[in-house]
Image (spheres, rainbow, N blue to C red):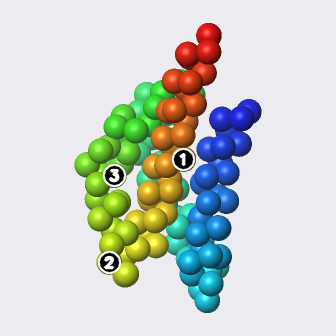
Amino acid sequence: MLQTSIHYGIHFILPLCIAVIFFKKIWVKAYFIMILGLLIDLDHLLANPIFDPNRCSINFHPLHSYYAIILYLILTLPKKTRLIGLGLCVHILADYSDCLLMVYSFNLI
């Protein structure tokens, strides 16, 4: 439950905070563009099983690979692609939090 709350909090609340704080005049548009970063989860359709709660997405799925993450970071630099890059980076951060919480919960056992 905690892991799910953190994961989806990062997915939906962090982009809202970024949009409201840094893109005040266009915060609705900025939020919507960053939320589109969720589309990279389409690469989960290539996995078997599609969803595994004990699998770390980072560097497992193609759009969650280290090479893709480097591209997402680069996308944050030009003004024209900044919101797309931020949305993708926030998505990766949410998925990375799952990986950290998985490792942490296994260490408690």
Q: Which residue is mark 3?
A: 69
Q: Position of residue 5 (x, y in %)?
A: 71, 42
- Residue 10 rendering spot, x and y as whole percentages: 61, 52
Residue that badge 1 annotates: 94
Mark 2 and mark 3 lie on one chain; the one further toward the N terminus is 3
Front residue of 29 and 50: 29
Rendered position, 87 above or below 25: above
The residue that appears at 37% across and 75% down in the rendered structure is: 81
**Disc assigned to residue 32:** none
Q: Residue at x 48, y 27 (%)?
A: 55
Name the amino acid, label 3: Ile
- Please, what is the three-letter code of the amino acid marked with disc 2? Pro
Mark earlier in primary sequence (2, 1)? 2
Q: Give the crowd class for mark 3: few <14, some 14-19, many >=20 residues within 10 Å.
A: some
Separation of disc 2 and disc 1 at Cα?
23 Å
What residue do we see at 71% from left, 35% from top? 2
**Which is nearer the eye, 25 or 54?**
25
Q: Amino acid at mark 1?
A: Ala
Cβ–Cβ below 8 Å for labels 1 and 3?
no
Give how far across and how far down residue 103 sits, in percent. 51, 24
Q: Quarter of the image containing the C terminus? A: top right
Determine which residue is flagged by label 2.
Answer: 78
Number of numbered discs overlaid on the protein picture = 3
Mark pair 2, 3: CA separation: 16 Å
Whichever of callouts 1 and 3 sits on the residue coming sooner in the sequence is 3
Task: Check disc 1 and report its element: helix, strand or loop.
Answer: helix
> Is any part of residue 37 visible from this angle?
yes
State left or right for residue 71 relative to residue 98: left
